[in-house]
Amino acid sequence: MKALVVGCGRVGSAVALQLQGSGWDVTVLDENEDALGRLGESWTGGFVVGHGMDLKLLREAGIEDADAVVVTTDGDNTNLVMAQAAQKLFQVPEVVVRVLDPARAQFYATKGLRIVCPTSAAIETLVSAVRHAEEEVPA
């Protein structure tokens, strides 16, 4: 299985390493060449330097043969445009995109994108923890 991970920050690099550890053939695309250091010296996957909205670079990174694309840059707009290109233009079977804005995440989820929204997850966890603590307080 082949995966393309766009964005090699804390999340993207961890995703790339875990997928590779599971036997996937992984290529990472990031604007910053220094981000390659996050993958470690034993990284055997591909690494392409450039912006993920560059169609030529996406092709160079192997998007046309990818079974999955994971988009994890630090910009919601960029992530959503790249995810839609992967899904609609390149017909990638599995596209997963990180979106920080809960309202935007909900909207694009209705458009068929697989969204991961850490902000929504954090809100739910924090509210649940407060409610749980509230239940434990003796009356």
Image: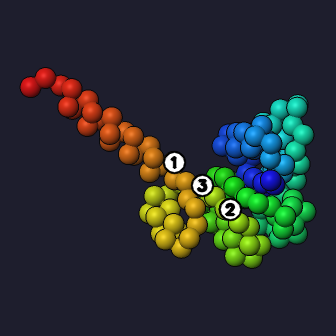
In the image, taking residue 45 as reference, residue 110 lies left or right, namely: left
Which numbered marker is on residue 94?
2
Classify 10 Å Cα crowding around label 3: few (below 14), some (14-19), many (20 and above): many
Would you say the residues marked 1 and 3 are in contact, meaning their CB atoms lie under 8 Å apart? yes
The residue under label 2 is which amino acid type? Glu
Residue on which disc 3 sits? 98
Residue on which disc 1 sits? 118
Q: Secondary structure at mark 2?
A: strand
User: Where is residue 111 shown, x and y percent of the image?
Assistant: 54, 73
Marks 2 and 1, how far apart in space? Answer: 19 Å
Query: In terms of sequence position, does the residue under pointer 2 or pointer 1 come before the other?
Result: 2
Is 134 located above or below residue 20 in the figure?
above
Occupied quadrant, residue 44: top right
Classify 10 Å Cα crowding around label 2: few (below 14), some (14-19), many (20 and above): some
The residue under label 3 is which amino acid type? Arg
Which numbered marker is on residue 89?
none
Is 128 located above or below residue 5 in the figure?
above
- Furthest residue in direction left, as rendered: 139
- Furthest residue in direction top, as rendered: 138
> 38 or 93, which is in the foreground?
93
User: Where is residue 61 shown, x and y percent of the image?
Assistant: 87, 59
Marks 2 and 3, how far apart in space? Answer: 14 Å
